[in-house]
Image: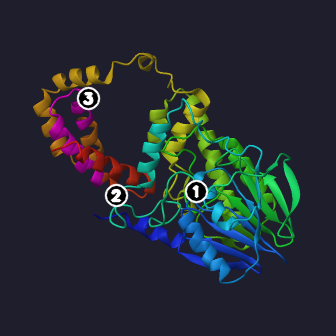
Amino acid sequence: MTAHPDLVAHAGQFPKRFADLAPGIWSAVGFAASNVYVIEGPDSLAVIDTTESTGAAQAILAELRARTAKPVGQIVYTHSHRDHISGAAVFAEGGAPEIIASHRFASDIVGDRGGPQKALRDRTRRQFGFGLDFPGERVNLGCGPGDRPVEGMGAGHLPPTRWITEDRVQASLAGRTADLIHAPGETPDHLIVWLPDRRILFSGDNFYHAFPNLYAIRGTPYRDFAAWADTLDRMLRMAPEVLAPGHTLPIVGAAAIAERLTDYRDAIRFVVEATAAGLNAGRTPDELAAELRLPGRLAGKPWLQEFYGRFAWSVRAYAAGTLGWFDGNPTDLGRLPPAEEARKVIALAGGGDAVLAAAEAADDPQWAMELADRLIAAQDQVQAALRVKVRALRIRAEAEVNATARNYYLSCARELEAETP
Ligand SMILES: [Zn+2]
């Protein structure tokens, strides 16, 4: 099993390392999907984010305890995604630290009852490649390492004890002055942390070294693109000298940070403006996803490569988030059921044998999958079609630079293989 060399090299963004970020501030990168930062004060510590597992949190705590015995007095959640909030109990060490979050905490989470919870779980497992072999199949997560402890949902989560309701509030973190700022971006519940005297910005998931995940294929509600771009503008105006993101390496240097935040903001605004213009011109999301490209100025930037988010999915997400599912073409108001459409097209193409032969001979794995899907929908040559699809999924995966797509393709290949004798 091979992998896209750029995706393999992307692991350089999350080497397993507990390091000094600045005097009295540590960063823990590569222990988990997400990063942890620790601010040391005169008598206590403040921890920003806690990883997705108690196992990863314990490994980070061991590094911390090799350097200081001060207790953790505060924990800040930058947002409510599971990979940031599930190791808090480990850092609490049996104590009761203040746990700070936005008053909008968890507003991004699909409700517990009556929702498509199982679909979300299944798709999350595929996106992150939970059942895949490492390193053969799951190279990495696009935002973090491929090998790290994985546990059940929120194993070591502790609920917030202090909710920030103001847009911006000055607080004391481990005895240091810090601004806690509402910063809707990847989620509406983002709370970012600014240390004004050090010009360090802990930015949660509003920036990482990959194209922004404006839509996650595990299934996410519409992420407010314009709000995310405005937040990046606000972060830019703060002129940070150290940027400490929730995923991938911290960045040091005002100019390097400004370039990245500007590009990120401009890429998101381009998705909004180009997609809106296309929709206004009567184009459909399918057409726009196929036609639109990031402008050349942005397309080559290392921090906008599609290891995690993807431009074309973002175009679709913007269209669906603003206009809903209908693409504007009246044909699509009442499409034939998939099985009926498939039977009619297969008959027109000369029958199941002919379609199967074309699928098996196809050079393009995407076309092979689309033909196989019709056979499967029509219940025609199903076992052979499944084998074609499994093979095509693996070919697609090997060429993928996007970790979530690779993991999804390979997870589905395994699931389908279980259905074929
Ligand atoms: Zn995250």
Residue at 81% across / 69% down in the picture? Answer: 199
Identify the mark nearer the N-term, 2 or 3: 3
- Asked whether, in this view, residue 292 is left or right of residue 77, the answer is left
Query: Range of the magenta residues?
Result: 372-395
- Asked whether, in this view, residue 360 is left or right of residue 392, the answer is left
Main SS type for the magenta part? helix
Residue 359 sits in which quadrant? top left
Q: Nearer the viewer, mark 2 or mark 1?
A: 1
Identify the mark nearer the N-term, 2 or 1: 1
**Residue 62 located within the stretch drawn in magenta:** no
Q: Establish whether ligand 1 lies closer than 8 Å to the Cβ of label 2.
A: no
Q: Establish whether ligand 1 lies closer than 8 Å to the Cβ of label 1.
A: yes
Rounded to the nearest angstrom, the CA distance separating label 2 from label 1 is 27 Å
Q: Is residue 202 above or below residue 271?
A: below
Amino acid type of the residue tagged 3 in the rendering: Ala
Residue 21 sits in which quadrant? bottom right
Dot 2 crowding, Cα within 10 Å, few <14, some 14–19, many 20+ = some
Residue at 21% across / 41% down in the picture? Answer: 386
Q: Which residue is mark 2?
A: 399
Q: Which residue is mark 3?
A: 377
Circles 2 and 3 in contact, beta carbons < 8 Å: no
Q: Position of residue 133 (x, y in %)?
A: 34, 62
Q: Nearer the viewer, mark 2 or mark 3?
A: 3
Mark 3, secondary structure of its residue = helix
Residue 254 visible in the displayed image: no
Q: Is residue 392 above or below residue 44?
A: above
Q: Which residue is mark 1?
A: 83
Amino acid type of the residue tagged 1 in the rendering: Asp
Rounded to the nearest angstrom, the CA distance separating label 3 from label 1 is 36 Å
Amino acid type of the residue tagged 2 in the rendering: Ala
Residue with the most extreme front position:
94
Rounded to the nearest angstrom, the CA distance separating label 2 from label 3 is 26 Å
